[in-house]
Image (cartoon, rainbow, N blue to C red):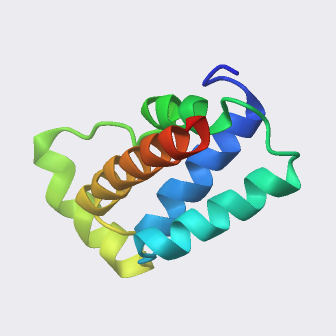
Amino acid sequence: MTPEDPIAQGLATMASAGFEFGGDDEQVAHDVRTMWQQLGSPAGAFDAAARAIARLPQRPEVPIADQARRRAFERAIGINPVEVELTAAMSARELLERMARSVAC
């Protein structure tokens, strides 16, 4: 399975969003594993999903002069800071890599 596969993209998105919204390793792993099982437990899905994290959509860059205004706007409408998104993506990738190793054993 490749990172471009819709299943890999879905698992990557689910894992990243789970961390972004405050889930811990155990809860996110449970949710991702449940989705994987509902999709038929495809081989290589966790590894492909871990690699798909790098391909998830990112916010467009904003010139430095506009960043304070953007942060204020995002805060006003409840969007997490970009740092939260990046930390969530890194946590998701690490979790998916561990899950891939556990399935391969």
Residue 71 point in image, percent of width and height: 24, 64
Q: Position of residue 14 (x, y in %)?
A: 61, 57
**Quarter assignment of residue 20:** bottom left
Q: Residue at x 76, y 58 (%)?
A: 35
Q: Nearer the viewer, residue 44 or 49?
A: 44
The residue shown at (26%, 41%) is 62
**x and y percent of residue 59 in the render?**
40, 43
In the image, farthest residue toward the left: 65
Task: Tell me: residue 56, above or below residue 72.
Answer: above
Q: Residue at x 42, y 68 (%)?
A: 25
Q: Name the spot of residue 27 as percent of width and height, x first.
A: 53, 75
Looking at the rendered image, the quarter that the C terminus falls into is top right
Report the residue that reaches farthest toward the front: 105
Above or below for 21 versus 61: below
Residue 15 as seen in the image, left or right of residue 44: left
- Horizontal arrangement in the rendering, residue 102 relative to residue 30 (left or right): left
Report whether 43 appears left or right of 72.
right
